[in-house]
Image: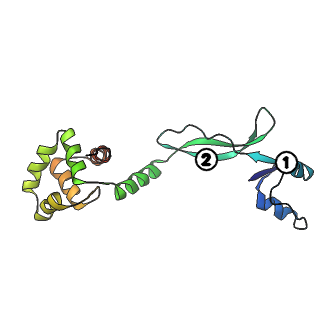
Amino acid sequence: MRLRIRETSAVVYDNEFRAMYPDTSFPLVLTADLLNDFGADPVLEGPQPTLAANQYSRYDGVQQDTDGNWMTHYVAVDYTAEELAAQTEQWRQSASCTPFQGRMALADAGLLSNVEAAITAADEKTKVAWEYALEWKRNSPMIATLMAALNISDSQADDLFKAASQITA
């Protein structure tokens, strides 16, 4: 719980407020009346902003609402290019699909026959992975080989894996 000290306008957490008065034994729950006696106001949780896909919510202090209550204030902040790249890489490390899902996504994209042709020309490890793997990982050597053979970009491969994850048998 955050509290606002009237005299300084400082916003502190419950434990920091209690530490300001080491000789006072506070009840477990700090009531508005008790806080008033110590010149503090409770800070209520304010609404979160509506976020776009490339944004996150960041605490931006407190402000009073129309009823005089102190509320936390949040703002939408755009991720930096570096943060977005790190998120994409993290997603790629964990993204996977079943061979069925992958084949159906390729078929839906009109690429299945092209991939099957590329498999016949691929190295033995890629052929075995295509035929027998129980799971296809986005960052696997087989996917990298097929991307190169078909001139598929990273974002196109990402889109195929996202589409595959939505397919059910």
Query: Which residue is rendered at x = 80% and y = 60% of the image?
Result: 28
Q: Which residue is mark 1?
A: 32
Above or below for 146 versus 46: below
Q: Amino acid at mark 2?
A: Arg
Q: Residue furthest front?
A: 169
Q: Which residue is mark 2?
A: 58
Query: Which residue is rendered at x = 43% and y = 53% of the image?
Result: 87
Q: Amino acid at mark 1?
A: Ala
Q: Which structural element holds mark 2?
A: strand
Q: Residue furthest top?
A: 66
Across and down, in percent, residue 126 comes to 15, 60
Across and down, in percent, residue 128 comes to 14, 62
Across and down, in percent, residue 77 comes to 56, 43
Above or below for 104 versus 128: above
| Label at residue 159 | none
Nearer the observer, disc 2 or disc 1? 1
Asked if residue 20 lies left or right of residue 72, the reply is right
Q: Which structural element holds mark 1?
A: helix
Could you tell me how many numbered marks the image carries? 2
Cα–Cα span, label 2 and label 1: 26 Å
Dot 2: within a 10 Å radius of its alpha carbon, few (fewer than 14), some, or many (20 or more) residues?
few
Q: Residue furthest bottom?
A: 23
Asked if residue 104 lies left or right of residue 11, the reply is left
Task: Give the mark, 2 or 1, whose residue is nearer the N terminus.
Answer: 1
